[in-house]
Structures are given as C-alpha cells and as structure tokens.
Image: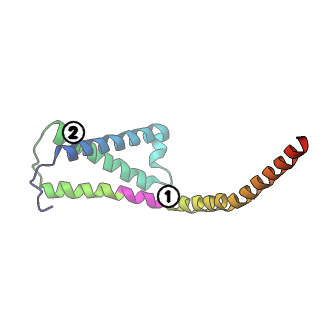
Amino acid sequence: MKDYDVKQTIFIQVLEVVFTVVYAVELTIKLAVHRFFFFYNSDMWWNIFDFVIVILGVVELVVFQLLGLTVTVNPQILRSLRIVRVVKIFRVARAVQFIKDLRLMLQCVIGSIASMMWSLVLLAGFALVFATLFV
C-alpha cells in the first residue's frame, strides 16, 4: 500500500483480467442454472456476496483497463476493495464438512487393502493348486 502510485506490471494486469473473467463466467453459469433461486436459497448471502464482488471486478475492469480512465478516487480505497475479493476464499470453509466424509471413505478403502491382498493370495493359491492338478 505504500507504493500505490506505482503502475502494475503487465503480468498482474493480465492475471486480474483472467480472474475477473473466470469469476464472471462462473457467476453467469450459476445465474443461468438457478435463475432467481440463486438469490433465495440457503446460500443466499454467499451468492449475493459473490454477485457484488464480481460486479465490482467487472466495473473496475471496464472503467480502468478497457476505457483507460484515470483514477480520480484515492487509489488506496480501490486497492483496499480488492482485499474483499480474498474473502471469497473463506467459502472453502463450507467444504470442510465434506472433507470429513472423504477422509472416512479413504480410511475405509485403505483398511480394505489388507483384506484384498489376502484375497489375492488365496486366489493365487487356488490357481496354483488347480494348475498343478490339470498339468
């Protein structure tokens, strides 16, 4: 924040455009699927938050990068608003409940590997016995 008057590198600008486009496409697909239910479900507040963040990103992209307008507002405020986008990462916290289920399933699979190995040994033994008998 101390160097807010320094121009961003082209890499950062391209990265910002890519993320804005990806989030806009994601939001568009969600709106196409859910329509008005997007704003009236159990995740209503997260959806509204996503909608506002994407709209702010698109407006910033259009106004500052495509139209080439200069910043008349304090750039510190605009860059501080970008931090709000990071809050979107906290949505991952909702997925933590699924991680417990995934861990349980993986433990079941790993626990059954020993039984599978003994089953393969038994099958190999039967194959050996019958192969010897047939020969």
Left or right? Give the position of 113 relative to 17. right
- Disc 1 residue type (three-letter): Ala
Reading the image, the residue beneath label 2 is 62
Q: Main secondary structure of the magenta part?
A: helix
Q: Nearer the viewer, residue 4 or 58?
A: 4
Per the model, the C-alpha gap separating discs 1 and 2 is: 33 Å
Which amino acid type is shown beneath numbered disc 2?
Val
- Dot 1 corresponds to which residue? 95
Q: Classify the position of the N terminus by image quarter.
A: bottom left
The residue nearer to you, when weighing 110 against 102, is: 110
Residue 119 screen position, x and y as percent: 77, 55
Q: Which residue is depicted at the point 49% across and 38% down? A: 33
Left or right of residue 77: residue 112 = right
- Residue visible at 81% across and 52% down? 125
The quarter holding residue 98 reads: bottom right
Mark 1, secondary structure of its residue: helix
Seen at 15% across and 49% down, the residue is: 8
Left of 116 or right of it: where is 60? left
Residue 131 relative to residue 10: left or right: right
Q: Residues within 10 Å of mark 1 (few under 14, many from 20)?
A: few
**Boundaries of the magenta span:** 88-94
Q: Point out the image quarter for the C terminus.
A: top right
In front of the other: 124 or 54? 124
